[in-house]
Image: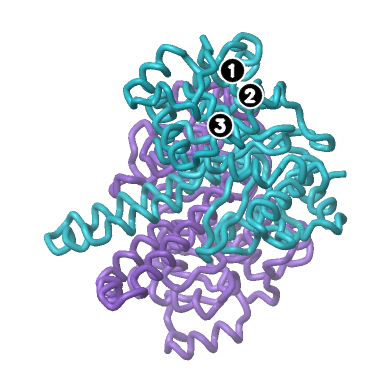
Chain colours: A cyan, B purple
Amino acid sequence: MTSLTLALDVMGGDKGPHITIPAAIHAVQEDPSLHLILCGDENTISAILANHEQLNNSQLSIEPASQTVEMCDKPAHAIRFKKDSSMRKAIDLVASNKAQACVSAGNTGALFAIAHFVLKTIPGVDRPALISSLPTHDSTKHVFMLDLGANVFCDSHILYQFGVMGSVMAETVDGVKKPRVALLNMGEEEIKGSDNIKQAAVQLAANDKINYIGFVEGNDIFANKADVIVCDGFVGNVALKTCEGVARLVYQKLKNHFSNSFSGKIIGKLLTPTIKKLFKILNPDQYNGASLIGLRGIVVKSHGNANEIAFYSAILEAIKEVERQVPIKIKAKLE
Amino acid sequence: MTSLTLALDVMGGDKGPHITIPAAIHAVQEDPSLHLILCGDENTISAILANHEQLNNSQLSIEPASQTVEMCDKPAHAIRFKKDSSMRKAIDLVASNKAQACVSAGNTGALFAIAHFVLKTIPGVDRPALISSLPTHDSTKHVFMLDLGANVFCDSHILYQFGVMGSVMAETVDGVKKPRVALLNMGEEEIKGSDNIKQAAVQLAANDKINYIGFVEGNDIFANKADVIVCDGFVGNVALKTCEGVARLVYQKLKNHFSNSFSGKIIGKLLTPTIKKLFKILNPDQYNGASLIGLRGIVVKSHGNANEIAFYSAILEAIKEVERQVPIKIKAKLE
C-alpha cells in the first residue's frame, strides 16, 4: 500500500529522463510509502528503468506521453498544442486527484501557464507565484521569496496576495510563528519605489493577520530581516539569478586564487568541500526547486539545469508540501 | 597652476566630512595638478583641515554651504528648499564651469533630481542614469550596468538611450571596441520579458552603431557575456544590492567556517586578505562609486556608507570621466 503519489514530468529539463528517472528511483528506495508516476515517452522510460533493474518496481508506474514541452515553446502554444506532453500529463494527474503533487524541471513559463489553466487558482488568488527559500546569515533560518519569475508584472493587489501566500508557506512549511513579511524595494524609506509597491504596503499593513514589517532592499534578502520577501516576478527572477551568478563568481575567484601557488593548491584542496557547500547554499533554486503556489494543487519546479540530486530535492519538497496541505491553508487564510 | 578642478559635497553620506575631507586630502597629495572645492559647513571643514594641517593647502578651497541634504529628504523637497546645501553647491559649481565634475555620497534620489534640474540632460537624452562597473569572471574585464536606481520605471526608448550611453561609457572609459550591449531580462529567449524590453531590443538592434547582442539573465551579469547591461533602475538597484548581500553572506559563512576549529582559525587568518579582496570586488558600488550619465556635466555618486578609500575611488572615477570627456562623446553618439 502506498500513501502518497506524485506525478513526475520525466522529460522536462535540460537533461531529461537521464537525471529525473534515477532521482525517482532514489526517492522510492528512500521512502517505501511513496508512489511515483513517471510521465513521458514510454519506450525511453522503460529502457532506463530496465537499465536500473527497476522495471518491476511497484512503486513506479508509467503514464505514456507522446510529446515534450520544449524550452523554447511559448506558454500559449504549450497549452493548445502539447496536450499529450509529459508536463501536461503530470499536471492532469494532479487535477484528477490521481497524484497529490507534480514535479517538473521543464519550461517555467509553460509549466506556469498549463498549471494555471488546468488546476485553476485558489478562490481569492488572482495569479499563482513561484516561491523558493533562500539562505540567511543565521544558518538555522531561511527566507521565502516570491514571485521568482511566474509573473512579469504584478499590481498592488497581486503583491498583497503574494504576501499572504508567502506568510502561509513560512508558517506551515517552516513552522515560523507570525512570519515577518516584507516588500522588496529600492530603499527602506516609505517614499521609495513604484506606486504598486506603496499601495501593496498599505494593503499588507491593514491585514492584522499578517505581520508586515515594511520594505527591505536587495542586500537585506540574506540578512534574516524577514521570513517572507515579496516582489514581482521580473525582479525576483533577476535577484535569484544574480545570487547564482555571484556564487559562481566567488567559486571561480577562490579557485583561481588557490591554484596560483603550491601552498595555495594545498589549502584549496582542504577548502574544496567548504566552497562546494557554500556554492550549494547560494544556489537554492538549483538545489531545492521552487514551488508554484496559489493553485488548487501542488506543483514543484526543479531547475532547468537540475542534476539528479536537485531533482530528488524537488521531489522531497513536493512531499513536504503535500504533508503540510499548503493549498488548503492558503485558502483558509484568504477567506 | 592646477589643470583639473572638482567640487565635493563633503557633508553627504553616512560619515560625512570625517571621511570625505581625509579622502580629498589624500587625492590632492597624490595628484599635484588637482584642485578640490570642498562644499559644506565652513567651520566644520576648517576644523578638520586644521586638524590635518591642511588649512593653507592651495589645492583645497572651501565653498560655504549652510544646509545639508538629509538621507530622508524627498527629491522635490531637496530641489526647492535646500538651495544652500553642500550637494546643490557642488552641482552649481559644475553648472557654472567652476568645476569640471562633482562627487557626492549623499541621498541618491536628491542628487539625481538636483543634478537633472540644474545641469539638464544632453540633447537626445530623456533621463540620466546611474551607471557603475561590476566584476566578471575575467579579472581583466568588467561590465557596465545601468540604470542602478535613478529611474524606477523606464520605457523602451529610455532603455534604448541607456544602451547608447553605456556603449559610449565602455568605449571611452574602458577603451572597449564595439562594446557588447545587452538587455537584462528573465530569459534569453526573445519571447521573454515585458513589452518595454522587447521594444528596446528592436530599437537597439536597429542602430548599426551599437553592437547589440540580445538578452542576458541575472546569472550572466558576471559571466563576461556583455560589456554593457541595461535595465530599469528598480531592477538594477535590486541586482546590485543583492550582489552586495551575497558578498556579505559569503564573507560571514567563510569566517564562521574557519572559526569552528583551531586549524580552521589558522587557515582563516591566512585567507583573510583574499576574502577581503573578494568582498571588495563584489561590492563595486561601495568601492568605486557610480556615475550619473546623460547630463551636461559629470556627477559621481559615492556609496552612502562609503569609507575614505571608497570616497577617494569616487574622486578618481570623476577625474577619469573628465579626462575621457564622457558627456561630449555621448552627445556625439546620440546625434
| Count of numbered circles on the image | 3
Mark 2, other Cα within 10 Å: few <14 / some 14–19 / many ≥20: many
Task: Look at mark 1 in the image and give the residue it sits on.
Answer: A74
Q: CA distance from mark 1 to mark 3?
A: 20 Å
| Residue at left offset 57%, top offset 50% | A133
Residue at mark 3: chain? A
The amino acid pointed to by label 3 is Val
Contact between labelled residues 2 and 1, with CB atoms less than 8 Å apart: no
Task: Look at mark 2 in the image and give the residue it sits on.
Answer: A91
Label 1: element kind: loop
Q: Quadrant of residue A244?
A: top left
Q: Earlier in the sequence, mark 1 or mark 2?
A: 1
Q: Which mark is residue A103?
A: 3
Label 2: element kind: helix
The amino acid pointed to by label 2 is Ile
Mark 1, other Cα within 10 Å: few <14 / some 14–19 / many ≥20: some
- A61 relative position to B197: left or right: left
Q: Earlier in the sequence, mark 1 or mark 3?
A: 1
Residue A152 visible in the current orientation: no
Position of residue A120 measured from the top left corner of the image (x, y, whole percent) = 75, 27
Contact between labelled residues 3 and 1, with CB atoms less than 8 Å apart: no
